[in-house]
Amino acid sequence: MISANRAGWTSPLVYVLALAVAGITIAPIVYVIIGGFRTTGQIANDPIGLPDPWVPANYADAAATGTFWGQAANSLIIATITTLLAVGLGAMAAFALARMRFRGRDALYSFFVLGLLFPVAVAVLPLYLLLRNLDLSGLLAVAVPQAAFAMPVTIVILRPFMRNVPGELEDAATIDGCGRLRFFWRILLPLSRPALVTVSVLAVVNSWNAYLLPLLVLGDAAEYTLPLGTAAFSSQYGSDTARILAFTALSMLPALLFFLVAERKMVGGLAGSVKG
């Protein structure tokens, strides 16, 4: 009876807390998007009001800016390279750590887990000096380090999936003449698709939102990513708040849409990782 009453009280409380967290998370995004449809005068008079009238010209002007599409292309190139490197190399490393037995395997996995605790900000300056010594610059100088920082979470999520695949399936594939590499490519990767989607989404979103590393590495304005472009746009049009909000909303829209499309697969991948 006590447990039933407790469940009756805790269930609504969980929903209330979930709605509160969702509101706190979504409110800034909604404010930026709606603010882009207002004028700077409207925002000054009523900061939290609705557009009256709606001003879509802010978005049209931001999209018509010549630098926006170039910066979007740079962000897309970096995110694509980062994701391909992180997911490709991470999947192979996770396969070795999950399906192969060798000395030091657990220690190596623990080393990757410790990588989750290593903040990017701490390594930015040494990383910048390393990239300069290697004479590596441009978009590739951003994508490669970002892929390295995405590797730990990729391995931590993929390893349980690959480890939970029954050994009998691999034995049957071996009997049919399927080598380890072919088993990895034809059987293991398709079975790990939810986890692959998860790590891909994380890599894309983190790369798209990265600011500090591109700020230090990209010296040419033509190579700027959208976060850098948004900061430069804000400096250039500091007095036009509505236009800045419109540019900011357009900058975050691709990553937001990609996340929403892949959200269900991502949740499944995280659930499988925790279970593993």
Image: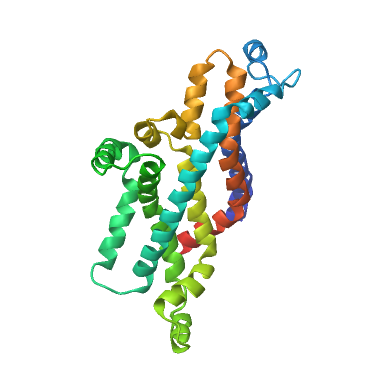
209 displayed left or right of 57: left
43 displayed left or right of 175: right
Q: Quadrant of residue 164?
A: bottom left
| Viewer-closest of 89 and 14 | 89
The residue depicted at 27 percent of the width and 35 percent of the height is 125
Quarter of the image for the C terminus: give it. bottom left
In the picture as drawn, the residue positioned furthest to the bottom comes out as 175
The answer to whether residue 261 is above or below residue 155 is above
The residue depicted at 41 percent of the width and 55 percent of the height is 85
The residue depicted at 26 percent of the width and 38 percent of the height is 132
The answer to whether residue 224 is seen in the rendering is no
| Viewer-closest of 261 and 125 | 125
The answer to whether residue 273 is above or below residue 42 is below
The answer to whether residue 72 is above or below residue 266 is above
The residue depicted at 56 percent of the width and 31 percent of the height is 68
Which percent across, then down, holds residue 152?
36, 54
Q: Quadrant of residue 170?
A: bottom left
Colour convention of the picture: rainbow
Which percent across, then down, holds residue 18?
59, 42
Quarter of the image for the N terminus: give it. bottom right
| Viewer-closest of 224 and 91 | 224
Q: Report the label total.
A: 0
The answer to whether residue 249 is above or below residue 99 is above
212 displayed left or right of 79: left
| Viewer-closest of 51 and 236 | 236
Which percent across, then down, holds residue 148?
35, 50
The answer to whether residue 47 is seen in the rendering is yes
